[in-house]
Image (tube, rainbow, N blue to C red):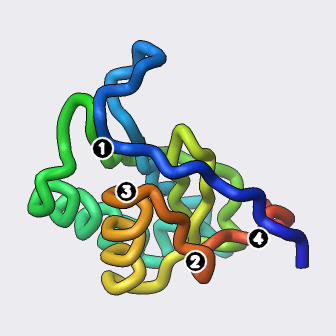
Amino acid sequence: MKSIPRIRRMSLSPPRDGGYYARHIFFCLNERKPGEDSCARHNAQAGFAHCKARVKAEGLAGPGRVRVNKAGCLDRCAGGPVAVVYPEAVWYSFVDEADIDEIVESHLKKGEVVERLLLPPDVGR
């Protein structure tokens, strides 16, 4: 297994680089044609909705903090459902609300990568 590069911790203070949010998490909600695997077929919408609610409930939403976004195809459906956190460019696969809760608590809130949920770098379409 390839080693995962160390990700620096980032506070949720307003970004110094002129950015509007400290972090974005994008959820692939793409649905491909019948017979093709896609994140939408793996309950991605529920993961997105739960994350958005948790971020709001934790007081993490808003300028200088966290934005939860819908995304079209992120071209990594084989590992779906998937989400990616920027600016760190950390890709996750998740199964249930407990996984989303861990991403919110560890990565979005504290800047700590949830290694057990990392999408392997070779997983693509």
Q: Looking at the rendering, which quadrant does residue 102 occupy? A: bottom left
- Left or right: 3 as drawn, with respect to 80: right
- Which residue type does callout 2 highlight? Leu
> In the rendered view, would you say 105 is above or below 23?
below
Q: Residues within 10 Å of mark 3 (few under 14, many from 20)?
A: many
> In the image as oriented, which residue stretches furthest toward the right?
1
Taking depth in this image into account, of 25 and 4 the one nearest to the observer is 4
Of marks 4 and 3, the one in the foreground = 3
Q: Looking at the rendering, which quadrant does residue 6 occupy? A: bottom right
- Which residue type does callout 3 highlight? Leu
Q: Residues within 10 Å of mark 2 (few under 14, many from 20)?
A: some
Q: CA distance from mark 2 to mark 1?
A: 19 Å
Residue with the mark numbered 4 = 120
Q: State the SS at label 2.
A: helix
Q: State the SS at label 1.
A: strand
In primary-sequence order, the first of circles 1 and 3 is 1
Q: Which mark is residue 108?
A: 3
Q: Residue at x 61, y 55 (%)?
A: 90
Q: Position of residue 15 (x, y in %)?
A: 38, 26
> In the rendered view, would you say 2 is above or below 109?
below
Of marks 4 and 1, the one in the foreground = 1
Q: Residue at x 43, y 61 (%)?
A: 107
Q: Position of residue 64 (x, y in %)?
A: 27, 31
Contact (Cβ within 8 Å) of mark 1 with mark 3: yes
Residue with the mark numbered 1 = 66
- Which residue type does callout 4 highlight? Pro
Q: CA distance from mark 2 to mark 3?
A: 14 Å
**Residue 90 seen in the current view:** yes
Q: CA distance from mark 4 to mark 1?
A: 24 Å
